[in-house]
Structures are given as structure tokens and as C-alpha cells.
Amino acid sequence: MNAHTTGMRQKLEGIIAITPFARAMGARVREVGDGMAELEIDVSPELMLQHHGYVHGAVVGFMADSACAWAAASLAGDVVTAEYKLNLLAPAKGERLWARGRVLKAGRRMLVVQGEVFVVDQGREKQVAVALATIAQVGAA
């Protein structure tokens, strides 16, 4: 792990620590750097499930959005999501979710990022969502 990657990881962990929603979700950085980021959460049945017993779409959306924003931040610094589209591919039922964001195109002010969300159930992984996001650099002129 290089100094930039280590610094980026520490920065994201600091952001999680001061962001109530990310902290409530129990978000953890798996990997970050060079236009890519991965995060994970443990599924809390008391907080995250909808009426069919699947992980709520809002939680899946949080994972996709965060992975995309963190991937963009690894290249552009301070960012916010301008928009994202989320396709739910399958019900998310399991004990853990993880997501990966990958920058597809970095412009001067905006970055286009793809996100994927996976559920882990009894050791098996299944992709449950894909997202395409536009991430804006904060303070970009």
C-alpha cells in the first residue's frame, strides 16, 4: 500500500467517523485508490430489512452511491454526488453487503463512475445492483 492509498483510506475512515448515516450503517473501507473504492457493511436485520426480508433498496443505494463517490474522491479529492441511477438486479438477502466503485471517465469537474453491489450469503456472493453515477468535484470552477 503506497502513501497516497494509505492517506486516502485514513481520510475516508475519518469521513465515516463524522458522518452519522455512514457510521449507523457500519460502513468499512475495504480498499481505495487510483479511481477505485470498495466498502462493506454487515446486514442488521433490525435496521436494514424491508417487509419481504430483503435488504432495503435505500441501503443498497447507499452502498452504490458511497462506492462511486469514494472511487471518485480517490482521484479528485472532495466530491459530492450529482446524480446516480441504480438498477436492482436481484433481492439482497444475506449477512453482508459489499460494493465496488470504478471511475470510467474523469473530467475537469465531473467524473462518471460505475458501481456494483454484492450480497454475501453463507459464503456465496451474488451481484444485486449496478449503478452509474456522476460525481462532482467540490469547489471546481
Image (cartoon, grey):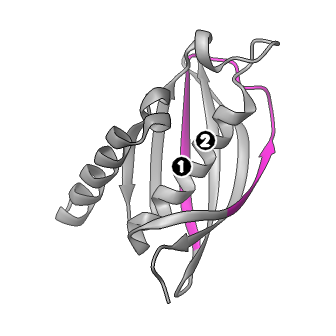
Quarter containing the N terminus: bottom left
Percent across and percent down for residue 34 are 39, 67
Q: Is residue 16 above or below residue 78?
A: above
**Residue under pointer 2:** 62
Residue type of the residue flagged with mark 2: Phe
Q: For residue 103: magenta?
A: yes
Residue 118 falls left or right of residue 66: right
Q: Residues within 10 Å of mark 1 (few under 14, many from 20)?
A: many
Seen at 64% across and 33% down, the residue is 59
* Nearest the eye: 42 or 81: 81
Q: Which residue is mark 1?
A: 66
The disc label shown at residue 42, or none:
none
Residue 11: percent from left, percent from top: 28, 54
Q: Secondary structure at mark 2?
A: helix
Q: Where are the magenta residues, as a range? A: 83-104
Tell me residue 133's x, y (percent): 67, 62
Give the prevailing secondary structure in the magenta stretch: strand
> Quick one: 125 or 137, which is closer to the camera?
137
In this view, 34 is above or below 6: below
Q: Is 111 displayed left or right of 24 in the figure? A: right
Q: Amino acid at mark 1?
A: Ser
The structure residue drawn at horizontal position 28% and vertical position 46%, both measured from the top left corner, is 14
Looking at the image, residue 28 sits to the left or right of residue 86; the answer is left
Location of residue 121 (image quadrant): top right
**How many residues crowd around disc 2 within 10 Å: few (fewer than 14), some, or many (20 or more)?**
some
Is 93 displayed left or right of 38 in the figure?
right
Q: Is residue 48 magenta?
A: no
Percent across and percent down for residue 50 are: 76, 18
Tell me the residue at 34%/42% (across/down): 18
Q: Are marks 2 and 1 in contact (CB under 8 Å)?
A: yes
Mark 1 lies on a secondary structure that is helix
Distance between the alpha carbons at the discs numbered 2 and 1: 6 Å
